[in-house]
Image: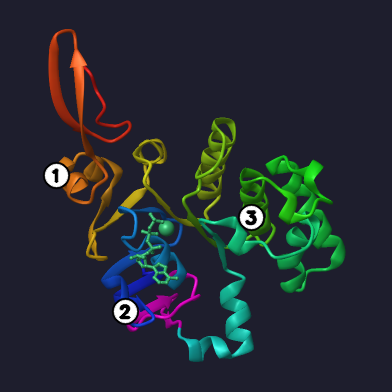
Amino acid sequence: MESYISIKNVSYSYYGKEQALCNVNLDIRKGDLLCIIGQNGSGKSTLLHVINALIFPDSGTFEFCGKAITEKYLKDANNNLNFRMQFGYIFQNPDIQLFCPSVIDELLFAPLQLQLSREEAEKRAHDTMKYIGIEHLKERSVLSLSGGEKKKVAIASILTMNPEVILIDEPLAGLDPKTQTFFTEMIIELHRIGKTIVFTTHNLELIDHLQPKVAVISEQHSVIKVGTTTEILNDEELLKNVNLLHEHTHIHGNEVHRHYHSHYVFHKHE
Ligand SMILES: Nc1ncnc2c1ncn2[C@@H]1O[C@H](COP(=O)(O)OP(=O)(O)OP(=O)(O)O)[C@@H](O)[C@H]1O
Ligand SMILES: [Mg+2]
């Protein structure tokens, strides 16, 4: 199958000094469910910014459907609309994403930008609010919402776009357990209907549940391994190296022993 999203030798540094990505290579196919893991500051969010063309590599290329997506390419209004309508990005911090005065305005924004009729936009907004369970927030000011409510609105505002590619930075961060379960099931459903999904997490339990392809970013900001969930979760050495497993001491009866574990997968007390 031909490559859909292709990241080749991409490096990026903020203001020319904070290195965030270093020679990153990654291929994503249409319909993939891919998770990017790595410790804090490794470059996960930066990589999603590159895939959404919010920033452009200092060197290397980002291609979508065989086209290099550059600043120059997106200066053309048609190219820009065509690219933007296919990508939805749910930010790690919903405060960055939400900018309309009310929840309903936020949900209508993308469909109206995409030149849908008012009637169709309202139907999408209504259906999405119902699906996410935020109808009661419809007229509320976005600024007055709790963190979890903002996250739900941020997710809803991307679903109203109905994009082909959905980028989700830390999908479960800041959500209560019931909402976490809901959004985990939502990711499964979106993948099932054929969306290409790229998400980031530190949560190995989520990976074990969703069984995505996994790309691991090192402290040095490079993708050092791409594999199946089983391949990555079985590679304890690698997970220790990228600080996703840590050492704990446990007491069992009179015995004290020390082992590495994440918060879940390797936390077995025989
Ligand atoms: N706006 C910014 N200005 C300067 N440096 C930045 C900026 N955003 C990120 N960085 C730096 O770039 C590197 C990668 O950051 P990034 O946010 O991509 O990491 P991350 O893997 O998403 O981390 P986390 O798990 O904490 O979300 C870090 O060293 C970070 O300090
Ligand atoms: Mg991040």
> Which quadrant contains ligand 2?
bottom left
Give the foreground label among 1 and 2.
2
Q: Tell which of 197 and 3 is nearer to you.
A: 197
The magenta span reads 51-69
The answer to whether mark 3 and mark 2 are in CB contact below 8 A is no
Q: How many angstroms separate mark 1 from mark 3 (CA)?
A: 36 Å
Of the numbered discs in the image, which one, if any, rests on residue 237? 1
- Quadrant location of residue 258? top left
Give the foreground label among 3 and 2.
2
Q: Which residue is mark 2?
A: 17
Q: Which quarter of the image is occupied by the N terminus?
A: bottom left
Give coordinates of residue 203: x percent, y percent: 38, 41
Which residue of the protein is positioned furthest toward the top in this rendering? Answer: 253
Please name the residue shown 46% across and 77% down the image.
55
Nearest to N terminus: mark 1 or mark 3: 3
In the rendered structure, which amino acid carries the disc numbered 3?
Ala
In the rendered structure, which amino acid carries the disc numbered 1?
Glu
In the rendered structure, which amino acid carries the disc numbered 2?
Lys
Q: How many angstroms separate mark 3 from mark 2 (CA)?
A: 31 Å
Q: Tell which of 150 and 52 is nearer to you.
A: 150
Please name the residue shown 71% across and 67% down the image.
110
Give coordinates of residue 89: x percent, y percent: 55, 62
Within 10 Å of the Cα at label 3, are there few (<14), some (14-19), or many (20+) other Cα atoms? many
Give coordinates of residue 61: x percent, y percent: 35, 81
Nearest to N terminus: mark 1 or mark 2: 2
Relative to residue 229, is residue 191 drawn left or right? Answer: right
